[in-house]
Image (spheres, rainbow, N blue to C red):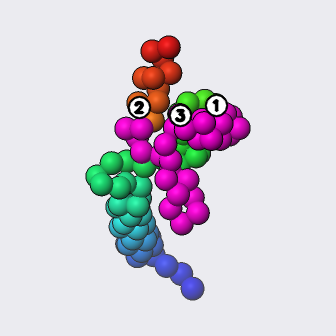
Amino acid sequence: MNIDRMEFISWMERVMDRFDMLNNHIDDLQKKRNSIDGEELLDNQDLLQMLKISSRSLQRYRSIGKLPYYTISGKLYYKLSDVHQFIRESFNK
């Protein structure tokens, strides 16, 4: 079965358009899912990369109450404003 060049390009453009639509939809879902009261939420992985700390250090900050967190569906999240406050308090010492 032979497909001419123009037909192939047309099909590929359709596929790429569909990928773009799916990507936009996924981005919209991510934005909705990772916010509460209009504020961005970060998960453990985001915070570990942002602060460049170990998971044990992050657990310690949670345990001693230095860093507020929220559990949603068994996963830990941190409000971005709480993280900024934690950073400010850590540097002020």
73 left or right, relative to 79:
right
Residue 38 locus on image (x, y percent): 28, 52
**Residue placed farthest to the front in the image?**
64
Q: Can I make out residue 16 in this image?
A: no
Please say whether residue 81 is one of the residues in the magenta stretch.
yes
Residue holding disc 1: 53
Question: Is 53 positioned to the left or the right of 70 in the image?
Answer: right
Pick the residue in front: 9 or 82: 82
Secondary structure under tag 2 reads: helix
Q: Secondary structure at mark 3?
A: loop
Which is closer to the viewer, label 1 or label 3? Answer: 3
Magenta region: 54-82
x, y (%) of residue 24?
A: 35, 61
Do residues under tags 2 and 3 come within 8 Å of each other at their CB atoms?
no
Residue type of the residue flagged with mark 3: Lys
- Amino acid type, label 1: Ile
Q: What is the secondary structure assignment of the residue under circle 1? A: loop
Q: Would you identify the image quadrant in which residue 36 lies?
A: bottom left
- 65 left or right, relative to 9: right
Question: In the image, which disc is placed on residue 66?
Answer: 3
Q: Which residue is mark 2?
A: 84
- The disc, 2 or 3, on the residue closer to the chain's N-terminal end is 3
* Residue placed furthest toward the left: 38
Pinpoint residue 65: horizontal percent, then vertical percent.
Answer: 55, 38
Q: Eyeballing the image, is 67 above or below 19? A: above
